[in-house]
Image (cartoon, helix red, strand yellow):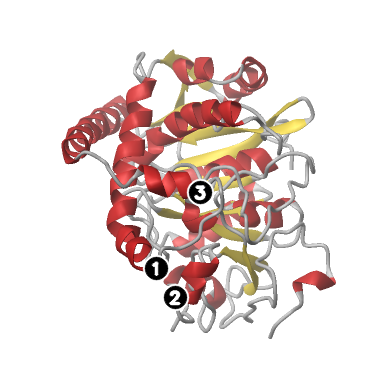
Amino acid sequence: MALDADEMDDHGAFVPGSRATCPPSGRGLLSGLRFAVKDLIDVAGVVTTGGNPDWAATHGPAPRDAPVVSALLNAGAELVGKTVTDELAFSLEGENAFHGTPRNPHAADRLPGGSSSGSAVAVAAGLVDFALGTDTGGSVRVPASFCGVFGFRPTHGRVSLEGVLPFAPSYDTVGWFARNGAMLQKVGQVLLGSGIANAEQARWHLHLVQDAFDMADAGCSAALMPLAKALGAQDTVQVFKGAARDWLTAYQVLQGDEIRQNLGAWIAQHRPTFGPSIHPRFDSIAHLDPQDVKRWQAWRHQQTQSLCSALAAAGDADGVLHALVLPTTPGVALRKDTPPEDIGRFYGTALALNALAGHTGLPQVTLPMGQHGGLPLGLSIIGPPHSDEALLALAANLPASFNTTC
């Protein structure tokens, strides 16, 4: 079945042309629900374009659904389309020079955030009940914050990446969006498989990451700080400890090295055309120093061990889970006409904030709890390894007193 994307206002969320759709293959927890899939994830018989015409021209239709898509169809959900992505996921802005920029439902003059921009917009605009994205350096978390929806990045390795276009595999995850925490949890129950027993009864000790709040825009911090405390953040911690630049640089070097390994040969062979903002990013990874890669790999291992051990060691004997609370993004959605220097500053902070979960493989949920200037802001919670189900239960059971933007 194919629908013409021009027959309805889809906010530019869906890949232009005929829609890839698929009816449910079973009945279950998601029966009666509609979902969309980022155009990095395979749907049988459809070319996964990765947001780039040259990638599409050099790849055939997917032979089968990615396991994450199969699981959702088997649970009763209906696929209603593939969504726009920034080219090969190399952006946090949400723009695509070929497929267009999905329209942020909260403000047409603002970017939706990327690279899972179409999926976030489809959910925020009420076009679907939930949507799949991918998250490497913030590509679910950033658009969730910009578009005012719930977003989830699972523990690295918890959700299959089979049938997903590889970008930087040691950071890549399949994440998802929903307009409420209960829906976010339902999707997780299908995709995560077995996990923590008694997740609904989990008790939390939340630590406010003071230096992360200090890194964010003043208005963002002022809006989110009281919400973090109302959520139960009982004390403050310093995680970056004056070295946020290291978290950023390590991510840029290690991500770049993995992108080169996974996409470099294809780029060299096909000389693809990229959009003006994407082209220099691929150029920048061509000459990484192997010694820098080794140095930052060792640094990443050390930081992962330290942070994961600290969260585990903080765990009380009676089963209390310890987690970090921080802004999802440095501020509200960027204007479409944001000057390049301001975009650069945004990346410098946003990538560092999102690298906490990225480097360490920890699960992170972003909650649309804040507003600044009438625009949504996400508040994030990073849990210990494999606390995914408990994080989703927390999101599903937020007190009604929290004024979420969705």
Tell me what residue is drawn at x 59 percent, y 26 percent: 342
Nearer the N terminus, badge 3 or badge 1?
A: 1
* Labels 3 and 2 touching (C-beta < 8 A): no
Q: Position of residue 356 (x, y in %)?
A: 39, 33
Q: Residues within 10 Å of mark 3 (few under 14, many from 20)?
A: some
User: Secondary structure under badge 2?
Assistant: loop
Q: Is residue 282 left or right of residue 97?
A: left
Tag 1 residue: 270
Q: Residue at x 64, y 56 (%)?
A: 118
Asked if the residue under mark 1 is in contact with the one under mark 2, i.e. CB atoms within 8 Å, the reply is yes
Q: Give the quadrant of the C terminus.
A: top right
Query: What type is the residue that disc 1 sits on?
Result: His
Q: Quadrant of residue 284?
A: top left
**In the displayed structure, does residue 194 sit left or right of residue 337?**
left
User: Which residue is found at the position 48% from the left and 50% from the top?
Assistant: 279
Which of the two labelled residues, at mark 2 and mark 1, occupies the earlier sequence position?
A: 2
Query: Picture coordinates of residue 347 (x, y %)?
Result: 50, 32
x and y, in percent, of residue 319 in the image: 35, 35
Mark 2, residue position: 58
Label 1 secondary element? helix
Residue topped by disc 3: 278
- The percent position of residue 46, horizontal first and vertical second, equals 54, 79
Query: 323 or 299: nearer the eye?
Result: 299
Type of residue at label 2?
Thr
Spatial CA distance of label 2 from label 1 is 8 Å
Of the image marks 3 and 2, the number of the one nearer the N terminus: 2
Depth check, front residue: 224 or 321: 224
